Image (cartoon, rainbow, N blue to C red):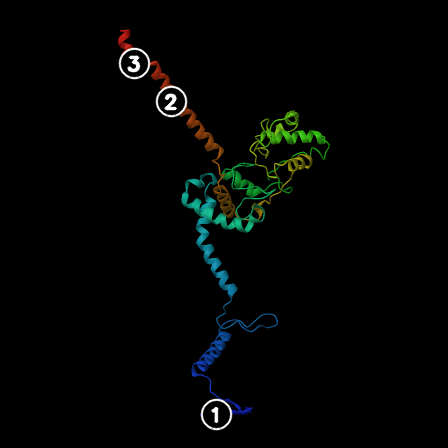
Amino acid sequence: GTETVGHEWDGIQELDTPMPRWWLMTLYATIIWAIGYVILYPAWPMVNSATEGVLDWTSRGEFDKEISAREAELKPIRAALAATDVNKLTKNPKLMQQAIEGGRSAFKVHCVQCHGSGAAGSKGYPNLNDDDWLWGGDLEAIEYTIVHGIRNPDHDQTRFSQMPAFGRDGILQSREIADLVSHVRTIAGKENASASSRRGGALFESNCAICHKSDGSGDRAQGAPNLADAINLYGFDRASLTDTITNSRNGVMPRWGQRLDAATIRMLAAYVYSLGGGEAPPALEKENQDVLEQAGIEKAGREQAESATPDDGASDEQS
Protein backbone atom coordinates (compact mmCIF):
# COMPACT_ATOMS: atom_id res chain seq x y z
CA GLY A 1 0.00 0.00 0.00
CA THR A 2 0.84 3.66 0.16
CA GLU A 3 3.40 4.72 2.73
CA THR A 4 2.35 6.98 5.59
CA VAL A 5 4.05 10.11 6.84
CA GLY A 6 4.66 8.40 10.18
CA HIS A 7 2.08 10.28 12.23
CA GLU A 8 -0.94 8.82 13.92
CA TRP A 9 -3.69 10.47 15.95
CA ASP A 10 -6.30 8.37 17.64
CA GLY A 11 -5.63 5.59 15.17
CA ILE A 12 -5.81 7.90 12.16
CA GLN A 13 -2.78 7.85 9.87
CA GLU A 14 -1.83 10.32 7.10
CA LEU A 15 -0.95 8.74 3.78
CA ASP A 16 2.03 10.05 1.81
CA THR A 17 0.19 9.98 -1.53
CA PRO A 18 2.31 11.48 -4.36
CA MET A 19 0.91 14.51 -6.24
CA PRO A 20 -0.67 13.82 -9.66
CA ARG A 21 1.85 13.91 -12.48
CA TRP A 22 -0.21 16.47 -14.48
CA TRP A 23 -0.14 18.82 -11.51
CA LEU A 24 3.63 18.55 -11.18
CA MET A 25 4.12 19.12 -14.91
CA THR A 26 1.94 22.22 -14.73
CA LEU A 27 3.94 23.54 -11.77
CA TYR A 28 7.25 22.99 -13.56
CA ALA A 29 5.91 24.64 -16.72
CA THR A 30 4.82 27.77 -14.84
CA ILE A 31 8.24 27.99 -13.17
CA ILE A 32 9.97 27.77 -16.55
CA TRP A 33 7.55 30.35 -18.02
CA ALA A 34 8.20 32.73 -15.10
CA ILE A 35 11.96 32.46 -15.55
CA GLY A 36 11.60 33.17 -19.27
CA TYR A 37 9.33 36.16 -18.58
CA VAL A 38 11.80 37.66 -16.12
CA ILE A 39 14.56 37.35 -18.71
CA LEU A 40 12.55 38.72 -21.65
CA TYR A 41 10.37 41.46 -20.09
CA PRO A 42 10.60 44.15 -17.39
CA ALA A 43 10.07 42.37 -14.09
CA TRP A 44 12.08 43.20 -10.98
CA PRO A 45 11.64 46.65 -9.44
CA MET A 46 14.83 48.47 -8.56
CA VAL A 47 15.45 51.66 -6.57
CA ASN A 48 14.97 54.08 -9.48
CA SER A 49 13.80 51.83 -12.30
CA ALA A 50 13.26 48.14 -13.08
CA THR A 51 14.98 45.37 -15.00
CA GLU A 52 14.38 46.06 -18.69
CA GLY A 53 14.41 42.56 -20.16
CA VAL A 54 16.33 41.47 -23.24
CA LEU A 55 13.43 42.37 -25.59
CA ASP A 56 13.50 46.00 -24.40
CA TRP A 57 9.66 45.98 -24.39
CA THR A 58 7.46 48.27 -22.30
CA SER A 59 3.73 48.83 -22.23
CA ARG A 60 4.39 52.55 -22.58
CA GLY A 61 6.48 51.96 -25.66
CA GLU A 62 3.74 49.79 -27.14
CA PHE A 63 1.21 52.53 -26.45
CA ASP A 64 3.41 55.15 -28.12
CA LYS A 65 3.83 52.87 -31.13
CA GLU A 66 0.07 52.48 -31.52
CA ILE A 67 -0.47 56.22 -31.14
CA SER A 68 2.18 56.93 -33.80
CA ALA A 69 0.54 54.46 -36.17
CA ARG A 70 -2.85 56.08 -35.62
CA GLU A 71 -1.44 59.57 -36.13
CA ALA A 72 0.18 58.46 -39.38
CA GLU A 73 -3.20 57.12 -40.50
CA LEU A 74 -4.93 60.41 -39.64
CA LYS A 75 -2.23 62.68 -41.08
CA PRO A 76 -3.74 62.90 -44.61
CA ILE A 77 -7.17 63.63 -43.15
CA ARG A 78 -5.79 66.38 -40.93
CA ALA A 79 -3.90 67.86 -43.87
CA ALA A 80 -7.04 67.82 -46.01
CA LEU A 81 -9.05 69.50 -43.25
CA ALA A 82 -6.46 72.22 -42.78
CA ALA A 83 -6.36 72.86 -46.54
CA THR A 84 -10.14 72.97 -47.03
CA ASP A 85 -12.05 76.23 -46.67
CA VAL A 86 -14.30 75.77 -43.66
CA ASN A 87 -17.35 77.01 -45.59
CA LYS A 88 -16.75 74.39 -48.30
CA LEU A 89 -16.40 71.48 -45.89
CA THR A 90 -20.03 70.42 -46.30
CA LYS A 91 -19.46 70.02 -50.05
CA ASN A 92 -17.12 67.10 -49.34
CA PRO A 93 -19.38 64.57 -47.54
CA LYS A 94 -16.60 62.06 -46.86
CA LEU A 95 -14.23 64.63 -45.36
CA MET A 96 -17.11 66.20 -43.43
CA GLN A 97 -18.00 62.84 -41.89
CA GLN A 98 -14.37 62.22 -40.96
CA ALA A 99 -14.25 65.64 -39.34
CA ILE A 100 -17.43 64.94 -37.38
CA GLU A 101 -16.07 61.65 -36.03
CA GLY A 102 -12.80 63.28 -35.03
CA GLY A 103 -14.67 66.17 -33.45
CA ARG A 104 -16.84 63.76 -31.47
CA SER A 105 -13.72 62.34 -29.81
CA ALA A 106 -12.14 65.75 -29.23
CA PHE A 107 -15.39 67.05 -27.74
CA LYS A 108 -15.33 64.30 -25.10
CA VAL A 109 -11.85 65.38 -24.05
CA HIS A 110 -12.10 69.18 -24.12
CA CYS A 111 -15.76 70.27 -24.03
CA VAL A 112 -17.94 67.91 -21.99
CA GLN A 113 -16.79 69.48 -18.72
CA CYS A 114 -19.03 72.50 -19.47
CA HIS A 115 -21.40 71.47 -22.26
CA GLY A 116 -22.07 67.92 -21.02
CA SER A 117 -21.51 64.57 -22.71
CA GLY A 118 -24.57 65.07 -24.92
CA ALA A 119 -23.76 68.76 -25.61
CA ALA A 120 -27.06 69.73 -23.96
CA GLY A 121 -25.30 72.14 -21.60
CA SER A 122 -26.74 73.31 -18.29
CA LYS A 123 -27.55 76.58 -16.57
CA GLY A 124 -24.92 79.05 -17.74
CA TYR A 125 -23.51 76.65 -20.35
CA PRO A 126 -25.13 76.71 -23.82
CA ASN A 127 -27.04 73.81 -25.31
CA LEU A 128 -25.28 73.09 -28.61
CA ASN A 129 -28.07 70.87 -29.95
CA ASP A 130 -30.53 73.67 -30.72
CA ASP A 131 -30.36 76.54 -33.21
CA ASP A 132 -30.28 79.35 -30.65
CA TRP A 133 -26.90 80.92 -31.43
CA LEU A 134 -25.36 83.95 -29.74
CA TRP A 135 -22.68 84.57 -32.36
CA GLY A 136 -23.84 82.56 -35.39
CA GLY A 137 -24.27 78.90 -36.27
CA ASP A 138 -22.50 78.54 -39.61
CA LEU A 139 -19.21 76.63 -39.70
CA GLU A 140 -17.06 79.75 -39.94
CA ALA A 141 -18.77 81.42 -36.97
CA ILE A 142 -18.54 78.26 -34.84
CA GLU A 143 -14.87 77.82 -35.67
CA TYR A 144 -14.14 81.46 -34.84
CA THR A 145 -15.78 81.06 -31.44
CA ILE A 146 -13.75 77.93 -30.72
CA VAL A 147 -10.48 79.54 -31.82
CA HIS A 148 -10.86 82.87 -30.03
CA GLY A 149 -13.18 81.98 -27.16
CA ILE A 150 -15.53 84.33 -25.32
CA ARG A 151 -14.52 87.21 -23.04
CA ASN A 152 -10.80 86.47 -22.85
CA PRO A 153 -9.36 89.79 -21.64
CA ASP A 154 -5.83 89.02 -22.88
CA HIS A 155 -6.95 88.42 -26.48
CA ASP A 156 -8.25 91.26 -28.65
CA GLN A 157 -9.98 88.95 -31.16
CA THR A 158 -12.10 87.16 -28.59
CA ARG A 159 -15.88 87.26 -28.74
CA PHE A 160 -16.94 89.98 -26.36
CA SER A 161 -20.21 91.47 -25.16
CA GLN A 162 -21.00 93.41 -22.01
CA MET A 163 -24.45 93.73 -20.48
CA PRO A 164 -24.85 96.49 -17.87
CA ALA A 165 -25.66 95.47 -14.31
CA PHE A 166 -28.82 97.58 -14.22
CA GLY A 167 -29.56 96.99 -10.55
CA ARG A 168 -26.09 96.75 -9.06
CA ASP A 169 -24.94 99.90 -10.86
CA GLY A 170 -28.08 101.83 -9.88
CA ILE A 171 -29.33 102.32 -13.45
CA LEU A 172 -32.79 100.93 -12.66
CA GLN A 173 -34.79 100.56 -9.47
CA SER A 174 -36.12 97.21 -8.24
CA ARG A 175 -39.69 98.00 -9.38
CA GLU A 176 -38.43 98.89 -12.86
CA ILE A 177 -36.46 95.65 -12.99
CA ALA A 178 -39.61 93.74 -12.01
CA ASP A 179 -41.46 95.43 -14.89
CA LEU A 180 -38.63 94.54 -17.29
CA VAL A 181 -38.83 90.92 -16.16
CA SER A 182 -42.57 90.94 -16.89
CA HIS A 183 -41.97 92.34 -20.38
CA VAL A 184 -39.25 89.80 -21.22
CA ARG A 185 -41.43 86.93 -20.02
CA THR A 186 -44.33 88.31 -22.07
CA ILE A 187 -42.43 88.55 -25.37
CA ALA A 188 -41.14 85.03 -24.74
CA GLY A 189 -44.69 83.73 -24.25
CA LYS A 190 -44.11 82.86 -20.60
CA GLU A 191 -46.86 85.08 -19.19
CA ASN A 192 -49.73 87.23 -20.43
CA ALA A 193 -49.47 90.95 -21.01
CA SER A 194 -50.14 93.11 -17.99
CA ALA A 195 -49.72 96.67 -16.77
CA SER A 196 -46.30 95.66 -15.46
CA SER A 197 -45.20 94.22 -18.81
CA ARG A 198 -46.41 97.34 -20.62
CA ARG A 199 -44.35 99.54 -18.33
CA GLY A 200 -41.48 97.13 -18.88
CA GLY A 201 -41.91 97.52 -22.64
CA ALA A 202 -41.14 101.23 -22.42
CA LEU A 203 -38.12 100.53 -20.22
CA PHE A 204 -36.96 97.84 -22.64
CA GLU A 205 -37.12 100.25 -25.57
CA SER A 206 -34.98 102.84 -23.81
CA ASN A 207 -32.47 100.50 -22.12
CA CYS A 208 -32.34 97.15 -23.92
CA ALA A 209 -33.50 97.50 -27.52
CA ILE A 210 -30.16 98.93 -28.66
CA CYS A 211 -28.68 95.42 -28.26
CA HIS A 212 -31.65 93.04 -28.14
CA LYS A 213 -33.73 94.99 -30.74
CA SER A 214 -37.24 96.27 -30.10
CA ASP A 215 -38.84 92.86 -30.62
CA GLY A 216 -36.26 91.12 -28.41
CA SER A 217 -34.91 89.00 -31.27
CA GLY A 218 -31.31 89.86 -30.37
CA ASP A 219 -28.28 90.79 -32.43
CA ARG A 220 -25.59 88.24 -33.25
CA ALA A 221 -23.12 90.94 -34.24
CA GLN A 222 -23.06 91.98 -30.58
CA GLY A 223 -23.64 88.57 -29.05
CA ALA A 224 -26.98 89.80 -27.69
CA PRO A 225 -29.30 86.80 -27.14
CA ASN A 226 -32.75 86.36 -28.61
CA LEU A 227 -35.17 86.96 -25.74
CA ALA A 228 -38.31 86.11 -27.71
CA ASP A 229 -37.69 82.40 -28.32
CA ALA A 230 -38.22 81.12 -24.74
CA ILE A 231 -34.64 79.78 -24.63
CA ASN A 232 -32.57 81.39 -21.91
CA LEU A 233 -29.06 80.44 -20.87
CA TYR A 234 -29.66 81.28 -17.22
CA GLY A 235 -33.38 80.52 -16.90
CA PHE A 236 -36.67 82.26 -17.69
CA ASP A 237 -38.18 82.16 -14.20
CA ARG A 238 -38.61 85.54 -12.52
CA ALA A 239 -35.81 84.99 -9.99
CA SER A 240 -33.24 84.12 -12.68
CA LEU A 241 -34.24 87.02 -14.93
CA THR A 242 -34.16 89.42 -11.99
CA ASP A 243 -30.65 88.26 -11.13
CA THR A 244 -29.54 88.63 -14.77
CA ILE A 245 -30.87 92.17 -15.13
CA THR A 246 -29.64 93.22 -11.68
CA ASN A 247 -26.11 91.80 -11.81
CA SER A 248 -25.51 91.03 -15.52
CA ARG A 249 -23.89 87.81 -16.79
CA ASN A 250 -20.34 87.36 -17.99
CA GLY A 251 -19.72 83.74 -18.93
CA VAL A 252 -16.28 82.84 -20.25
CA MET A 253 -15.14 80.24 -22.79
CA PRO A 254 -11.44 79.37 -23.29
CA ARG A 255 -9.81 80.26 -26.59
CA TRP A 256 -8.80 76.87 -27.93
CA GLY A 257 -6.68 78.35 -30.71
CA GLN A 258 -3.71 78.48 -28.35
CA ARG A 259 -4.22 74.90 -27.12
CA LEU A 260 -5.35 72.82 -30.10
CA ASP A 261 -4.10 72.48 -33.67
CA ALA A 262 -6.10 73.81 -36.61
CA ALA A 263 -7.32 70.37 -37.74
CA THR A 264 -8.71 69.47 -34.30
CA ILE A 265 -10.49 72.82 -34.07
CA ARG A 266 -12.04 72.26 -37.50
CA MET A 267 -13.16 68.80 -36.38
CA LEU A 268 -14.79 70.32 -33.30
CA ALA A 269 -16.53 72.94 -35.45
CA ALA A 270 -17.85 70.23 -37.79
CA TYR A 271 -19.11 68.15 -34.86
CA VAL A 272 -20.91 71.07 -33.18
CA TYR A 273 -22.35 72.08 -36.57
CA SER A 274 -23.71 68.55 -37.06
CA LEU A 275 -25.56 68.42 -33.74
CA GLY A 276 -28.71 69.92 -35.21
CA GLY A 277 -28.37 73.70 -35.20
CA GLY A 278 -25.87 74.20 -38.00
CA GLU A 279 -26.69 77.01 -40.43
CA ALA A 280 -25.60 77.90 -43.94
CA PRO A 281 -22.98 80.66 -44.29
CA PRO A 282 -24.54 84.15 -44.56
CA ALA A 283 -23.25 84.54 -48.13
CA LEU A 284 -24.86 81.25 -49.15
CA GLU A 285 -28.10 82.17 -47.40
CA LYS A 286 -28.16 85.46 -49.33
CA GLU A 287 -27.40 83.61 -52.56
CA ASN A 288 -30.23 81.17 -51.91
CA GLN A 289 -32.56 84.03 -51.00
CA ASP A 290 -31.63 85.88 -54.21
CA VAL A 291 -32.36 82.72 -56.21
CA LEU A 292 -35.73 82.32 -54.50
CA GLU A 293 -36.59 85.97 -55.02
CA GLN A 294 -35.55 85.82 -58.67
CA ALA A 295 -37.63 82.68 -59.12
CA GLY A 296 -40.57 84.47 -57.53
CA ILE A 297 -40.15 87.47 -59.82
CA GLU A 298 -39.97 85.24 -62.91
CA LYS A 299 -43.03 83.27 -61.77
CA ALA A 300 -44.98 86.47 -61.10
CA GLY A 301 -43.95 87.78 -64.53
CA ARG A 302 -45.17 84.62 -66.26
CA GLU A 303 -48.46 84.72 -64.39
CA GLN A 304 -48.91 88.38 -65.28
CA ALA A 305 -48.12 87.69 -68.93
CA GLU A 306 -50.54 84.77 -69.01
CA SER A 307 -53.31 86.84 -67.46
CA ALA A 308 -52.68 89.65 -69.96
CA THR A 309 -52.86 87.31 -73.00
CA PRO A 310 -56.50 86.85 -74.16
CA ASP A 311 -57.68 83.28 -74.56
CA ASP A 312 -59.02 81.88 -77.84
CA GLY A 313 -62.64 82.54 -76.94
CA ALA A 314 -62.01 86.18 -76.16
CA SER A 315 -60.17 86.62 -79.47
CA ASP A 316 -63.08 85.24 -81.42
CA GLU A 317 -65.52 87.55 -79.70
CA GLN A 318 -63.35 90.59 -80.30
CA SER A 319 -62.87 89.75 -83.95
Q: Which residue is mark 3?
A: 311
Q: Given the image, on which type of amino acid does mark 1 rest?
A: Glu
Q: Is residue 233 or residue 269 the one in the foreground?
A: 233
Q: Give the x, y percent position of residue 125.
A: 59, 43
Report, in whole angstroms, how far the alpha carbon at label 2 lies from the one at label 3: 19 Å
Element marked by disc 2: helix
Mark whose residue sits in front, 2 or 3: 3
Whether residue 54 is situated above or below residue 240 in the rendered picture: below
Name the secondary structure under disc 3.
Answer: loop
Q: Identify residue for label 1.
A: 3
The answer to which of marks 1 and 2 sits earlier in the sequence is: 1
Q: Quadrant of the C terminus?
A: top left
Instruction: Give the residue type at disc 3.
Output: Asp
Q: Which comes sooner in the sequence, label 1 or label 3? A: 1
* Residue 127 location (% of width, % of height): 55, 42
Q: Is residue 221 left or right of residue 290?
A: right
The N terminus: image quadrant: bottom left
